[in-house]
Image: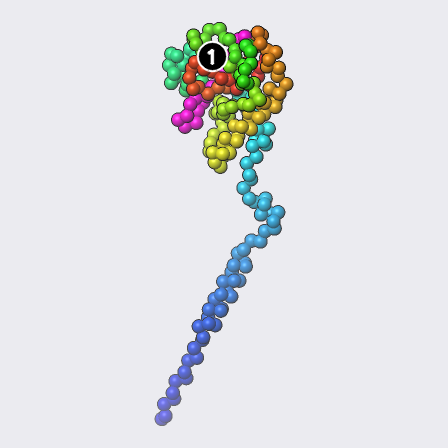
Amino acid sequence: MTATAPTPRRRVPIRWITTAAVAVLVVLMAVSTEYRTAETAAAAAPKKFDPAAFGAQNYEAKIVPAVKSAAVDLPVLLDALAADKDAASQKYGKRQGTGPYTFAVKVTGEAGAVKSGLLPVTVKGLPDGTRVSVQTGPAINGTALRDAVGFITFGQFTNQVEYADAATALNNQLRDKLLKGLDAAGLEGKQISVTGAFTLLTPQTVTITPVAIS
């Protein structure tokens, strides 16, 4: 009996295998890929922070009521700070991290002559040497309005620039809503009442960013 020689196996060229694998991969990518128009891609992208919109949405609706609600009489606050700075700061103030405390305050006194955008106010019952002034613009400095309310935090923003822009936007709203029509020079010698916020750098110098002047 004659043995039959085994039929030789045909080898599939490697290039065919590679081509087939690439084809399968392309099909899988096509199935799993979500195609978007320019409009849908733009809608899905993170919204860019708009400082002007932030200021307009928050100043009158949230910031002004919060400052007015939390405002403590300035003589009461300064007496409390002199007695126990840490306790008074925690009771009346707000701050982010380890930064300085910011306070919502109200004060009544005699207005002086406005100079360099600051209106001095003589207030009875304050410690000797205390100088009180109110920012009247046109430049409004600092972050007191942002920081005094406690509900605007760094974690709400993408970076430090946006956080700073939020404070500037609130100051811009203050200037447009309150200070634009204010005759600061005409207040000299008059009794005025001010509600606003200030950041404590030294108890002897109180510079208030106002939300109300009457």
Horizontal and vertical percent position of residue 130: 45, 11
Few, some or many residues within 10 Å of mark 1 (<14, 14–19, 20+): some
Query: Which residue occupies the foreground of this view, 66 or 148?
Result: 148
The amino acid type found where label 1 is placed reads Arg
Q: Residue at x 61, y 11 (%)?
A: 186
Examine the residues drawn in magenta and state their main secondary structure. Answer: strand
Question: Can residue 91 be seen in the rendering of this structure?
Answer: no
Q: Residue at x 49, y 28 (%)?
A: 152
Looking at the picture, does residue 92 appear above or below residue 153? above
Residue at the right extreme? 181
Query: Which residue occupies the foreground of this view, 96 or 33?
Result: 96
Residue at the front extreme? 116
Horizontal and vertical percent position of residue 137: 56, 20
Q: Is residue 8 left or right of residue 62?
A: left
Q: Is residue 174 left or right of residue 85?
A: right
Figure quadrant of the C terminus: top right
Q: Residue at x 46, y 10 (%)?
A: 75
Horizontal and vertical percent position of residue 182: 61, 16
Q: Residue at x 41, y 25 (%)?
A: 99
Horizontal and vertical percent position of residue 213: 58, 15
Looking at the picture, does residue 166 appear above or below residue 120? below
- Residue denoted by label 1: 131
Magenta span covers which residues? 93-110
Q: Which quadrant holds residue 89?
A: top left
Looking at the picture, does residue 81 appear above or below residue 11? above
Instruction: Give yes or no for residue 71 being in the magenta stretch.
Output: no
Looking at the picture, does residue 127 appear above or below residue 87? above
Q: Which quadrant holds residue 95?
A: top left
Q: Secondary structure at mark 1?
A: strand
Question: Can residue 150 be seen in the rendering of this structure?
Answer: yes
Instruction: Give yes or no for residue 108 being in the magenta stretch.
Output: yes
Query: Which residue occupies the foreground of this view, 23 or 45?
Result: 45
